[in-house]
Image: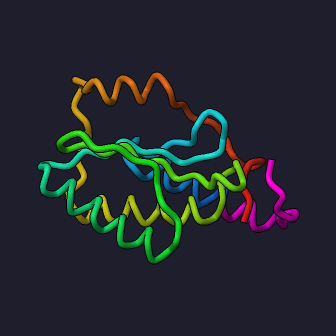
Amino acid sequence: MSSSTSIPAELKITLQSQVDHLIANSAGRWRVSNDGASLEAKISFPTFKKTWQFMDAVAAKAVASKHHPEWSNIYNQVFIRWTTHSDSILTDKDVHMAVFCEETALAFGATLETTSSSGLTRLIDQITGSRNVAEHIVV
């Protein structure tokens, strides 16, 4: 677990509400990992070019924020995970970067997935899941 100090309850509630809002308003793209230590998304775009532009914008923000994602890309899809390895739990950095990614994805034309899932999507579904993370948030 984390060596971080205790987090005030008000801050946990604020971060939890941000996570809840992100999940509720992202067309099913975002979820909390099974272990509660990361926020993950599968994001599809209309073209490879839009996908790359999204990744470039996220990369620039990640460098500026000194917080980097785990991610993979296949043609017009990106799987992205925000986690703080040094704390092994979800942090405010993860939440803020996930919110940035959702806003940026919408700006680059993120689309809803069709009913036929790609191999990447099926694999991601097998290794990820969702759960409440209030007890896993640290700042």
Where's residue 8, x and y in %?
84, 67
Q: Quadrant of residue 35?
A: top right
Q: Is residue 79 magenta?
A: no
What residue is shown at x 36% (from left), y 65% (from top)? 59
Instruction: Please give left or right for residue 133 compared with residue 9 in the image.
Output: left
Outermost residue on the right side: it is 6
> Which residue is more in the foreground, 26 or 45?
45
Q: Quadrant of residue 109?
A: bottom left
Q: Is residue 122 above or below residue 137?
A: above
What residue is shown at x 21% (from left), y 57% (from top)? 52
Q: Give the range drawn in magenta.
A: 1-15
Instruction: Please give left or right for residue 17 compared with residue 1 in the image.
Output: left
Q: Is residue 48 above or below residue 93?
A: above
What residue is shown at x 44% (from left), y 68% (from top)? 62
Where's residue 61, x and y in %?
40, 72
Where's residue 105, x and y in %?
30, 59
